[in-house]
Image: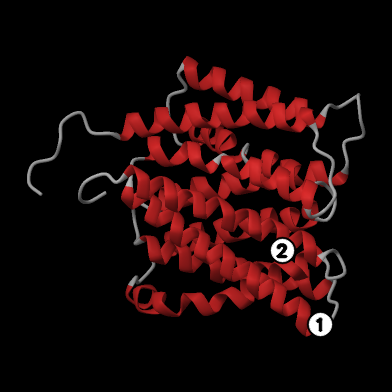
Amino acid sequence: MNGQSRPVAGAFWMLVTGFLFVAVTATVKHLGDRVPAPEAAFLRYLLGLVFLLPMLGALRDARLGRRAMMLFSARGIVHALGVMLWFFAMTRIPIAEVTAMNYVSPVYVAIGAALFLGERMHWPRMLAIAVALLGVLIILRPGFREVSTGHLAMIGTAIFFAGSYLIAKIMADEVAPSVVVAMLSIVVTLALAPFAIAVWVWPTWSELGWLFLVATLATTGHLTMTLSFRAAPIMVTQPVTFLQLVWATLLGALVFDEAVDAYVVLGGTLVIVSVLVITLREARARKPAHPPNGP
């Protein structure tokens, strides 16, 4: 991050990011399930390809090798599976539950980093992971209520997204961020195509408009999140992201007439605190012991 830290600006942009991502969730919820989940996910990414136009130059100059293409392909397929499950879950369970369970993804990233990338698992991280998994159990309450296909889909979503992030973590050190983003969008679109064709239902112009809005909101959300990270350290911005659970709970209650579930709020809070601990520890671990020389 260049220049002085601007915590107020960082918190503001992250607050906007939270609104935008909850708006994405609400728009998909409003769209309903007439368009099957694989097709809705495919159309969202297909329509979103228009936002890749500024990245074409960087993509053309990247000269990706065989290894990079294999990793990008693997990431795209894994991410596509996660996106399909997310779209499916949105039509089956309340917005607050989707939001709360989506927070578990960084926990799976931490586990995967220890298993596959050789990162050390210290006891605070292990404790945070255990608390997060307890939070998931509180949300699901197996044995006390039916665990629906939507809940299972969200578990799969978090796992697949974690795999996608781990591959992105590897590639981020080798190619430009714009190339990582562009390749994800392209490969995910291609990977979703056969699933979409298999269940194809002709969308209305209205449904296409809602899906384009999803793509626009998601792209803008990633932009404002980048502005937040540039303005302030992650220790300032990360706690603000968890207000998404508040917005999602209120939106579900006020707009979609979804009951506020105290167990979801409690379990989501445990997951949020655990992810915050993991994130802050990782941020401190990456901070250099001595400031670099020069500007």
Query: Residue at 56% across / 27% down in the picture?
Result: 273
Looking at numbered disc 2 in the image, what kind of residue is underneath it?
A: Thr
Q: Secondary structure at mark 1?
A: loop
Image position, residue 88 (x, y; %): 79, 56
Of circles 2 and 1, the one toward us is: 2
Question: In the rendered image, which residue does mark 2 sit on?
Answer: 27
Quarter occupied by residue 144: top right
Furthest-bottom residue in view? 205
Furthest-top residue in view? 123
At label 2, counting other C-alpha atoms closer than 10 Å, the crowd grade (few under 14, some 14-19, many 20 or more) is: some
Query: Residue at 72% across / 50% down in the picture?
Result: 251
Question: In the rendered image, which residue does mark 1 sit on?
Answer: 204
Q: Is residue 65 visible?
A: no
Q: Is residue 291 left or right of residue 269?
A: left
Query: Residue at 55% across / 22% down in the picture?
Result: 128
The reply to whether the C-beta atoms of the residues labelled 2 and 1 are less than 8 Å apart is no
Up-down relation of residue 132 to residue 250 (above or below): above
